[in-house]
Image (tube, helix red, strand yellow):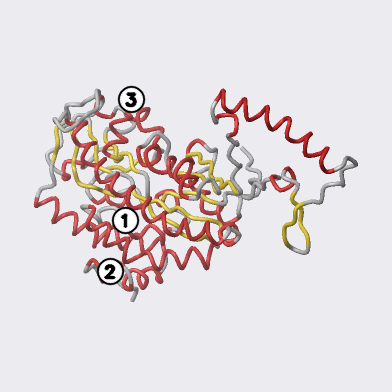
Amino acid sequence: MTLARWPGIFHGSSASERLGICCQNGGLALATMPQSPFPRSHLILRLLRPAATLLTGALMVGTGWAQTPPAPPLQKLRIVGGLANLNQYTRNEAPFWTQTLARLSAGKYDADIVPFDQAGVPGSDMLRLIELGVVPFGTALMSSLSARYPQYSAPDLAGLNPNIASLKQSVAAFRPYLEKELRTRHGVEVLALYIYPAQVIFCKRALASLADLTGRRIRVSSASQSDFVSAWGGVPVLTGFAQIMDNMASNNTECAITGTMSGHKLGLHEVTTHLHTLPVTWGLAIFGANLAAWDALPPDLKALLRRELPALEAAIWAESERETGAGLACNTGAQACSNARQGHMVEVPLSAADERRRQEIFRATVLPRWIARCSVRCADVWNQTIGPARGIRAPLAP
């Protein structure tokens, strides 16, 4: 579809016109009413008669008649959010923009939000559309940017973060660089960084360790996942999230890397038997604003968003951590699962041998190939950000 530029973010109210308020020398003044031709006493009597009638009615029906409808918001933002039907969106993003914003601003500001996968916006184009101002406020998945902008995928490279604590370290170390680059190079103001539940491996056949991936066709969603799978001897198959079940049904793939809970909602527990618990990646997402649109916001709205979006970000991170555990429980049929649909998959934990091999593969394969796709400068960026925080130095070009 062809995307037209979105309407302006300001939706002005004509309340001042309805109230008879006009501008005068840069300020507001009540419009002057014409002089009445009736004597003042006669005018007062005419005014008192309907007032008495209204008072009688008020005593009969209570105070409901006097309620005034709320004024429309002075400004409504247009937001493109994350993936539809996942709790990160339905429980956090959507309520914040459609309910919490209006409550915190006493009705002064409001927003509409649509998930990007239902907005007709290609994920790989999201950053560019925000940069152009076509999407003034939008969410971009890191994995969808990795082909065009591999440098931004550094904090969520496959095999880097085996738990959420290590992910937090990586993101905190890389965030200042990411925010500066997006602002100066793309004209995008980073307002929050979201994550999705851990991306793990679902397989149709028995799996005792990651070494058993050799020769298997495995669904991946990014270049670094492809590098990780190839290093284990697997055959990476790049497909979209919506095509996972079709590819499993046609035997084009026999394993898939996806989120623990999103995989369960797809029904992977009904067509696969084994689930390895290592988080290959986490699904990092950037929520950002076109810089011109951001600068045009009223100061009090910008201050509100700066204050409240970190809380939304923290809530989404906590939701993703809970969802990771809940997804594992529901896919394996553990008692902790509260969903009606439960699987009976075999949970394969990360062994000591798998952990040693994970570290080797990341240092010897995933990191060098990311640098090769990126540029020599990316090695310097890594060694100034994530490298020191995680104790992993990137090899420099000779």
- Residue lying farthest to the front in this orientation: 41
Residue holding disc 1: 157
Q: Give 8 or 6, whichever is nearer the viewer.
A: 8
- Element type where label 2 sits in the image: helix
To which residue does mark 3 refer?
Answer: 249
To which quarter of the image does residue 39 belong?
top right
Q: Position of residue 78 (x, y in %)?
A: 56, 45
Q: CA distance from mark 2 to mark 1?
A: 13 Å
Displayed quadrant of residue 271: top left
Q: CA distance from mark 2 to mark 3?
A: 41 Å
Query: Tag 3's secondary structure?
Result: helix
Q: Residue at x 53, y 51 (%)?
A: 137
As measured in the structure, the alpha-carbon distance from the residue carrying label 1 to the one carrying label 3 is: 28 Å
Q: Residue at x 13, y 47 (%)?
A: 350
Residue 143 % position (x, y)? 40, 49
Q: Amino acid at mark 1?
A: Leu
Label 1 vs label 3, nearer the camera: 1
Of the residues shown, which amino acid type is indicated by label 2?
A: Gly
- The residue identified by callout 2 is 387
Image quadrant in which the N terminus is located: top right
Upstream in the sequence, badge 2 or badge 3? 3
Q: Label 3 amino acid?
A: Ala
Q: Which mark is residue 242?
A: none
Residue 89 left/right relative to 132: left
Question: Mark 2 touching mark 3, by CB under 8 A?
Answer: no
